Image: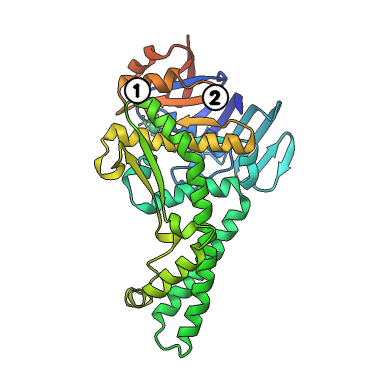
Amino acid sequence: MTVTEFHCKNWRNLAETTLRPQAGINVFYGENAQGKTNLLEALWVCSGARSFRGAKEADLIRFDQKAARLDLAFEAGGRSQQLTMQLGAGKQITLNGVEKKSATDLCETVATVIFAPNHLGLVKDGPQVRRGFLDFALARLKPSFAALQEQYDRALDQRNALLRDRRAATMGELLDLWEDALARLGSIYARQRQIYTQRITPFASRFYYELSGQKETLGLAYDGAEASADEGGYELLKEQLRQARETDQRMGYTTVGPHRHDLLLTINDMPARTFGSQGQQRSAALALKLAEAEVLAEYSGEVPVILLDDVMSELDGGRQDYLLNKFSGRQIFLTCCDPAAIPRLSDGSVFLVKDGEIHARA
Ligand SMILES: Nc1ncnc2c1ncn2[C@@H]1O[C@H](COP(=O)(O)OP(=O)(O)OP(=O)(O)O)[C@@H](O)[C@H]1O
Ligand SMILES: [Mg+2]
């Protein structure tokens, strides 16, 4: 997908501005609080997703205004398309002139992947962030995945409730039932995550290797792979649940299963979370997001637009150079504060963001 023109009105601090990006890399620079992240957020929301800053819809509308409007002209599926989004009283979305009831399936047409500073958590934070990454990516590829997740969560809630209810006379039998359901759903759940991990691994490894100047390696492994086995995954999970019963009753929750699994990341065979430097961790998180975009492209046939917010800080010259110049074949929107990185840009468009306005630079 390629954005050809973007217009927004009353989106956060962007009063009214029009952008004509090029098909390759577009760099947006400017001082703090000028509207760079707001611009990427607007493009991201065009893909039907919620704000990556967890903002409420009302926060997205410019202070003192009642409505915001986004207009996106783009090439996708071999033709020119047009999206309009009106926020505020009477939210309205149209795609190629046809009104859309909901934004949820927009991502099938408007494909973007965002890397924001909080995505560093993919490497630095606890396992729930990495599980969330896998699950979000899977839900985007397969609508049926969300239903599986829901069923699993429901079975988990039931087992947890039983663990805490010591009075139930038939608890043993009921636990048997819910553990069977959990093991059955859980092994499918883990298998989906394991397959996805296998799909992103070659891309993430290659991006990381290239980013690091062909010096370092990134390893990925789904920690829970045994439970995902086609043969024996169900039996294994069931046995794990049975064995954990006593502990789980004491704890009051379920301690085994996909809701406890992790995506293990290593840099040069050492755990990235504990041993990675700032730049290495940032590079690893970035490699994961770029790999997510590749898998999405493989699946949908449409290369997503890549939104990179504030990715340059902490990256050395070589890594910045890779991002700015070696990463062709897709449209990129990249923000930074420091225009000093821009001389490194051999081909691309540069824009200054100031006071909520976007100015093209020669
Ligand atoms: N609904 C809104 N209406 C008007 N202004 C808003 C609204 N929401 C946020 N802002 C303002 O937008 C400004 C710019 O935010 P943004 O996050 O885009 O800055 P930035 O250019 O990315 O800065 P930095 O380099 O610090 O990341 C903030 O000062 C914020 O107060
Ligand atoms: Mg910002």
The amino acid beneath tag 1 is Gly
Q: Kindly give the residue lying farthest to the front in the view shown.
A: 231
Q: Kindly give the residue lying farthest to the bottom in the view shown.
A: 169
Q: Quadrant of residue 141?
A: top right
The residue drawn where x is 47% and y is 8% is: 362
The amino acid beneath tag 2 is Arg
The residue drawn where x is 62% and y is 30% is: 72
> Does the closest atom of ligand 2 sit within 8 Å of the Cβ of label 2?
no
- The answer to which of 264 and 114 lies nearer the viewer is 264
Direction from residue 321 to residue 290 in the image, left or right = right
The residue drawn where x is 35% and y is 17% is: 341
Q: Which residue is mark 2?
A: 330
Direction from residue 153 to residue 255 in the image, left or right = left
Q: Is residue 333 positioned above or below 91 on the image?
A: above
Colour treatment of the image: rainbow
- The answer to which of 287 and 43 lies nearer the viewer is 287
- The answer to which of 39 and 69 lies nearer the viewer is 39
Quote the CA–CA distance across marks 1 and 2: 21 Å
Q: Kindly give the residue lying farthest to the right in the view shown.
A: 98
Q: Which residue is mark 1?
A: 213
Q: Nearer the viewer, mark 1 or mark 2?
A: 1
Q: Is residue 37 positioned above or below 122 on the image?
A: above
- The answer to which of 67 and 225 lies nearer the viewer is 225
Which quadrant of the rendered structure holds the N terminus?
A: top right
> Residue 245, percent across and down?
38, 76
Secondary structure beneath disc 2?
loop
Secondary structure beneath disc 1?
loop
